Amino acid sequence: MDADSRGFEGWAVNLRKHELIGLRVEVIGASDPSQAHLEGRVVDETRNMLIVDVRGEEKRIPKHGTRFRFAVPGGFEIDGDEIRYRPEDRVKKAR
């Protein structure tokens, strides 16, 4: 059974307006080289940052200048600038 038949075809578009807290994420590109390739779970979000639990330590990752891969069916990569809004505004904006 492929992802489309399980109802996951909308993830790519809808991730921009869904809650990110709780999702697993990997930083695949960052302006700060020390943050590249960090992996963990999103525990909080602000307009400009994702706060990610990386092996028990919270890391503040700026959205600007960072590319993320979220662990959703099929995986999904997005530039942080595309989600650089307050979470409550981002949900409204993507409608």
Image: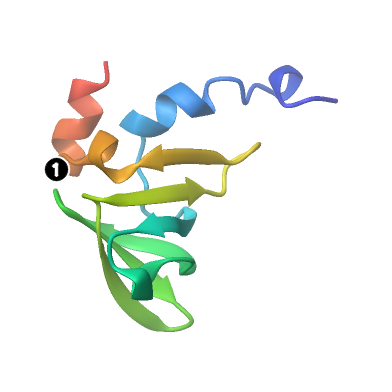
Tell me: residue 5, above or below residue 57: above
Give the class, few, some or many, for how many residues have Cα within 10 Å of label 1's Cα (few <14, many ≥20).
few
Tell me: residue 91, above or below residue 51: above
Q: Name the kind of residue labelled 1 in the image.
A: Arg
Of the pair 61 and 15, the residue shown nearer to us = 61
Tell me: residue 35, above or below residue 73: below
* Label 1: element kind: loop
Q: Position of residue 76 (x, y in %)?
A: 53, 38
Q: Position of residue 57 (x, y in %)?
A: 37, 83
What is the residue that sits farthest to the right in this orientation? 1
Of the pair 51 and 7, the residue shown nearer to us = 51
What is the residue that sits farthest to the bottom in this orientation? 56
Q: Quadrant of the C terminus?
A: top left
Q: Position of residue 40 (x, y in %)?
A: 48, 67
Q: How many marks?
A: 1
The residue at which mark 1 appears reads as 86
Of the pair 25 and 32, the residue shown nearer to us = 32
Q: Quadrant of residue 19?
A: top left
Q: Residue at x 49, y 66 (%)?
A: 37
Q: Quadrant of residue 43?
A: bottom left
Side of 88 relative to 83 (left or right): left
Q: Position of residue 48 (x, y in %)?
A: 15, 52
Q: Quadrant of the N terminus?
A: top right
The chosen color scheme is rainbow
Q: Residue at x 48, y 40 (%)?
A: 77
